[in-house]
């Protein structure tokens, strides 16, 4: 399946390279293509994220947004394309790293929250143990430090500390997401990846999770990439948005611009379909 | 003197795919705006005044023309600038004041107002103090400062919005009917704040339902019309700033 992406007929002039922002992007992906047999999941995708920025990725199911996020978390390798993170001691294409190097790099620099908590948590270990596991991978060995840092991360994620030794399997969906979030931010990652973090949660719990994310973003200026099919979530959270369809980026821009003046036919359909 | 804003031949249309047609908003708009100047946009409903403001703010993408903005680092074309530069300028230099509150739910009024100061690096306590001062200035009652504005009346929400938009002095303010539905006290507070900002060199361009509210501030006016009058042909692309207060430029859109 080859994705078709006709040029939008809004015909706005192409955007220039940054002139005022002198800090380089923290994340740069170029020409990412990933095929599974005859299915093209990602086709020549470029992505850039600047420090402190929140990039939203929207699109219908199967558009490739979660596949792209997994690439950012080095869980998969594309057929072609490069991935660089502007972090101390890192250079070159990260897809060239071996499995161990990827694991260490991600543990220290990238946090991820999955839609399905089973992917991100050991459901029969304690919540604090799940957070501590992340710290252990990164090399922390002192029990006191592990316990203190786990408590701190759970507290920052607004998890009730009296339940920090409860197992995720005993917790509600919203609480499980908070444990995932605590695990993701425990090492103050340079990049936080969120894959549909509120999908499947009750509306009130969704709101609480978004509030926590927004507060973390405001207080810690964490760079985030958030994938969601919910335009409201992206509108609330993101500075910029990338619209994906059939493995391609059909449009990207400032979140207010893309939602108020969408240039591509598919983006217009998406925005008009919003309740 | 270098203008803060130099708009050249700006054109905007919307392509509606479901109708398979273009909706023309305006074309060939040119004007300049200097530091401390206040420019009033006039014209009938639907002529494109708010669309022009949103295009200047880059919520809308223009099809042609330039929006040269004089940043501290140099001149930058807002029409084609990188998104990350626009984000930076919105946080630092360019404000958009509208009658509609765009606030996240479940965030208290004082925190919403304090947000621009927090982003600029002001400490939480100091930012909240300043936010509460401005809420008081715009007539928001003290017992509402910690409440969620989503539960407020339209007028109260607007006051929160104004306090947030005007708390941090910027270089350029785009004002989209900021006085609509305000009571007399809040209107007076707004005009006082705008006058202070103008004295401090902030350039402003705005649409006002009742221009009389800001009559003392207006330096120039641009009248947007849908008809091209023969004697205004030159004004469309060559409108230059005029020094005399109250001067009127006709711009056919």
Image: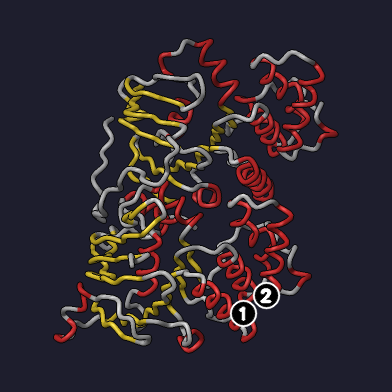
x and y percent of residue B149 in the render?
66, 66
Using the rendered image, report if marks 2 and 1 lie on a common chain: yes
Left or right side of B60 for B116: right
- Who's the residue at 53% across and 80% down the image? B180
x and y percent of residue B71 in the render?
40, 56
Which residue is farthest bottom? B212
x and y percent of residue A266 in the render?
34, 49
Where is mark 2, residue-wise? B137
Asked which secondary structure carries label 2, the reply is helix
Mark 2 vs 1, N-terminal side: 2
Tag 2 and tag 1, C-beta contact below 8 Å: yes
- Who's the residue at 62% across and 73% down the image? B159
Q: Is residue B184 visible?
A: yes
C-alpha gap between disc 2 and disc 1? 7 Å
How many numbered tags mark residues here?
Answer: 2
Q: Which corner quadrant holds the N terminus of chain B?
A: bottom left
For label 2, count other residues whose C-alpha is less than 10 Å away and answer few (under 14), some (14-19) or many (20+): some
Near-viewer residue (B107 or A17): A17
- Who's the residue at 35% across and 69% down the image? B52
For label 1, count other residues whose C-alpha is less than 10 Å away and answer few (under 14), some (14-19) or many (20+): some
Q: Is residue A201 visible?
A: no
Near-viewer residue (A38 or B87): B87
A14 lies above or below A156 = below
x and y percent of residue B18 in the render?
30, 59
Q: Which corner quadrant holds the C terminus of chain B?
A: bottom left
Q: Quadrant of residue A96?
A: top left
- Who's the residue at 43% across and 19% down the image? A91
Where is mark 1, residue-wise? B189
B172 lies above or below B118 = below
Q: Chain of mark 1?
A: B
């Amino acid at each position: 399946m080859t994705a078709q992406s006709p040029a939008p007929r809004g015909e706005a002039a192409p955007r220039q390279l940054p002139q005022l922002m002198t800090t380089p992007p923290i994340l740069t992906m170029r020409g990412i293509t990933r095929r599974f047999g005859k299915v093209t999941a990602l086709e020549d995708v470029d992505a850039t994220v600047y420090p402190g920025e929140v990039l939203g990725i929207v699109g219908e199911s199967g558009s490739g947004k979660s596949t792209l996020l997994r690439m950012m978390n080095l869980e998969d390798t594309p057929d072609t394309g490069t991935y660089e993170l502007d972090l101390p001691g890192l250079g070159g294409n990260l897809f060239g790293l071996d499995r161990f190097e990827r694991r260490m790099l991600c543990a220290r620099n990238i946090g991820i929250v999955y839609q399905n908590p089973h992917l991100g948590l050991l459901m029969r270990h304690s919540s604090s143990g799940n957070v501590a596991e992340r710290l252990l991978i990164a090399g922390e060995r002192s029990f006191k430090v592990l316990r203190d840092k786990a408590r701190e991360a759970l507290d920052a994620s607004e998890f009730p500390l009296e339940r920090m030794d409860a197992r995720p399997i005993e917790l509600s969906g919203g609480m499980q997401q908070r444990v995932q979030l605590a695990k993701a931010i425990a090492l103050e990652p340079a990049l936080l990846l969120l894959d549909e973090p509120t999908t499947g949660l009750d509306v009130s719990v969704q709101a609480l999770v978004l509030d926590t994310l927004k507060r973390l973003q405001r207080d810690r200026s964490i760079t985030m990439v958030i994938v969601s099919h919910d335009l409201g979530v992206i509108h609330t959270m993101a500075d910029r948005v990338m619209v994906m369809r059939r493995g391609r980026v059909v449009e990207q821009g400032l979140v207010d611009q893309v939602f108020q003046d969408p240039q591509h036919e598919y983006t217009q359909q998406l925005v008009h379909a919003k309740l | 003197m270098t203008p803060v804003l130099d708009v050249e031949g700006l054109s905007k249309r919307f392509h509606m795919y479901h109708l398979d047609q273009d909706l023309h908003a305006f074309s060939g708009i040119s004007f300049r705006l200097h530091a401390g100047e206040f420019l009033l946009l006039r014209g009938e409903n639907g002529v494109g005044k708010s669309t022009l403001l949103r295009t200047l703010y880059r919520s809308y993408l223009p099809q042609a023309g330039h929006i040269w903005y004089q940043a501290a680092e140099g001149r930058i074309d807002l029409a084609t600038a990188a998104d990350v530069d626009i984000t930076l300028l919105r946080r630092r230099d360019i404000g958009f004041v509208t009658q509609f509150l765009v606030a996240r739910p479940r965030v208290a009024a004082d925190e919403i107002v304090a947000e621009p100061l927090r982003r600029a690096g002001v400490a939480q306590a100091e930012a909240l103090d300043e936010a509460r001062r401005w809420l008081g200035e715009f007539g928001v009652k003290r017992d509402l400062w910690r409440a969620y504005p989503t539960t407020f009346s339209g007028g109260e929400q607007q006051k929160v919005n104004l306090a947030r938009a005007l708390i941090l002095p910027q270089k350029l303010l785009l004002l989209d009917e900021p006085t609509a539905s305000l009571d007399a006290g809040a209107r007076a507070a707004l005009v006082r704040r705008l006058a202070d900002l103008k004295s401090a060199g902030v350039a402003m361009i705005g649409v006002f339902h009742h221009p009389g509210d800001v009559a003392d501030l207006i330096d120039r006016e641009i009248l947007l019309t849908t008809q091209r009058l023969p004697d205004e042909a030159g004004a469309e692309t060559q409108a230059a700033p005029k020094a005399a207060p109250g001067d009127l430029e006709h711009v056919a859109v």
